[in-house]
Amino acid sequence: MNKLGEIISEELFVNAFHICRSYCTSGEILFDVNFLLLKDRLTELSDRRVRSYYKKYVATDLLYSLPELFSSDLVSVPKKLSSLREYRFFSVPSMLLYNAAGLLFVDSCSRFIEQLDFTRRNVFSFYPTKFQRGASGWEARNDYRTEYKGFSDRLKTAIQPGDVVLRLDISNYFETISHAKLVSLLRRFSPASTLAKHNVSRQSLAVLEFYFESLMQRRQGIPQGRKNFLSDYFGYLYLLPFDIAAEQLTDVSNLKFKCLIRYVDDVFVVMASAPNLRPRQVFKDLLVIEQRIVSWLYGNLGLNLTAEKTQREIIHTPSVRDEFLKTSKKAVSSRPELENEADDAQKTEMEQYFKEFVQTLQKFRIPEVDRFDFDLPLKDRETLKHVLSKPFQSFLLKRENIEKVQTLLNRVDFELTAEQINIVIALFYLEQDNKRPFFEILQRFLQTQMNLKDKRHIHILLACFAQASGPPKLKTQIKKSAATLRLDDYGKYLLCFYGLESTSPDDSVYRRICNEHKGARLKRGLFLFTPLSDFERLVEFVAKYYSDQQTIIQPLKHYIYERWNERWDVAFNHFQNVFHELCKLKFSLRDTATITDVTTALKDISVEDELLLMKFYDRRNFNAISHPSQKGKPSVKVSREDLVLYEPKLLALITRHLLN
């Protein structure tokens, strides 16, 4: 298997760094908690340090020896009233690597995909983040509103009275993207010349599959996040084969393919109906088409549709069309375009927006009713976004408006704002004369009603105090709840923001993010912090002295991979290979070196250490992976307990006798 660094070049890696740093320094409000944690670290890094890291860890595959360098921390965040969704937190190195892997796809596929001219085939695909080639590499333009407006306008133009529309909802789209199928698209949509430039061959595709599996700890799924720029692109790219097949899949006698319009995985298939066709026949044909699509998506992309969310609609009249378009909109977080309107018109518009804004705030209240199911309508979600507009912010800060909003906020049930908190938070941080007129209300809620066992409250806190530190009393409350928060995959990041974290080597991604957030000093010339464990000392030693020795880097890489996959017996063998290869390199031992050769070379080890090594080598040779049997006796499979028994002792021995 090739090394990842042979496919992802140093220039792509540095380009990924520039994209991430540019976002942190753009002046935008940073809503993404992960980026807020890493902002200062990304800002202070230099190209020189990033290139040094690439050469030591990416180019050599040594990055796979430490999960914090290639993987992500899985957290669950609130969704709607009481459900959860998957989210990923990256350390700086893993974030850069993920974006660099994505740029490989962008650099390889973009030219051919643009030349295919899908619009001529009446296929219109939109996605939030577009990449443009600039003088110094790829640049990311993350413009949700512009892209969504293009999608919405296309729907308005395409769907007319007399049409039939099939709207598809793909179940758990990002979580079910197959790594093997995603990687295969790299060859399908890239010219041979570009693939050769990146050293991508049929055999080397396995390298990328290995990376994605290591990142996600499973063989499907890509990270979701507000600013995982390349996730948008992967989501767009993965459905391109369906874009190509759509017209053929919808070929039935009574319905004629008109167009396909999608916003990432939000898919609309529009068809023209034969004249005077009865609704019964329309829906019968639609179900035939739907079944074809279901079979194709599952067979070719491993995707399923959510049957109960599929929409089948006959657009009889203009009013039906208007209602369908209205209910089909999707909320996208962006700043309303209010800045360029004339003063008088703007004032009238501001008054209307304020009226709607007030009405929406009033809905964040649990009513005295027998049945309650809170789901904020699309119109209200869009209304909240006015708070991101500077003209509207100025209008809000008029004295009479401040008083009205303060009164409303004092009645709000804040837990209902959890899903929209990344928008609402802008309200609390509005300043006038160095004062925040709405902030005290939020603080009062946090100090008197905050429940740190409620993930919605944790989500609100993280969004709030990622922007600024909280009041001292709140820090005291969080400190008292530290034991509870450490048990929550998301809540532990509150401790990170307040410098109260407690980490362990087993939680290395989280520990790395904590160090990066605190601004812990990087070691000169390396991307690593001062090693805290014997294993980290080993990795640093290999990076310093044996970065060109794949005989030790590969077992290090596969030891971590197998350990994460809980294949303890295979991991044990790789761990033994790490030790043995290190001894061979350190003492120039021959390939046939035995345990006796090793203990002889380790001149000053104690009897206890020698006994440990003898048992360690024997356990390796009495392992079903290495030797199914010995003298007719079946070998015993290595368990987690076996591995854990030897790991700390051998790593301590390595530190004492080999790392000097």
Image (cartoon, rainbow, N blue to C red):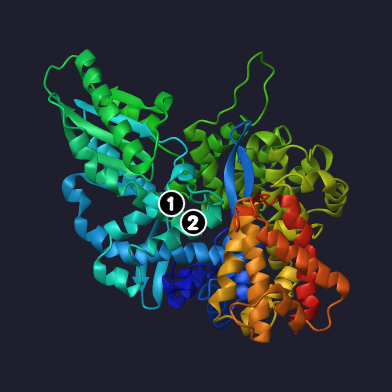
Residue 179 numbered mark, or none = 1
- For residue 33, say whether it is visible: no
Front-most of residues 536 and 17: 536
Determine whether, in the image, residue 151 is placed left or right of residue 361.
Answer: left
In this view, 461 is above or below 163: below
Determine whether, in the image, residue 413 is placed left or right of residue 239.
Answer: right
Determine whether, in the image, residue 615 is placed left or right of residue 572.
Answer: right
| Residue 288 in picture, x, y percent from top left | 24, 24
Classify mark 1: helix, strand or loop. helix
| Residue 158 in picture, x, y percent from top left | 23, 38
Front-most of residues 449 and 171: 171
Front-most of residues 235 and 58: 58
Asked which quadrant contains residue 432, the reply is bottom right
Residue pictured at 49% horizontal, 75% vertical: 14
Tell me the residue that label 2 is attached to: 212
Q: Quadrant of the N terminus?
A: bottom left
Q: Amino acid at mark 1?
A: His
First of labels 1, 2 by sequence position: 1
Q: Amino acid at mark 2?
A: Phe
| Residue 343 in picture, x, y percent from top left | 45, 52
Residue 97 numbered mark, or none = none
Q: Residues within 10 Å of mark 2 (few under 14, many from 20)?
A: many
Q: Quadrant of the C terminus?
A: bottom right
Q: Are marks 1 and 2 in contact (CB under 8 Å)?
A: yes
| Residue 222 in picture, x, y percent from top left | 49, 51
Determine whether, in the image, residue 521 is placed left or right of residue 192.
Answer: right
Q: Residues within 10 Å of mark 1 (few under 14, many from 20)?
A: many
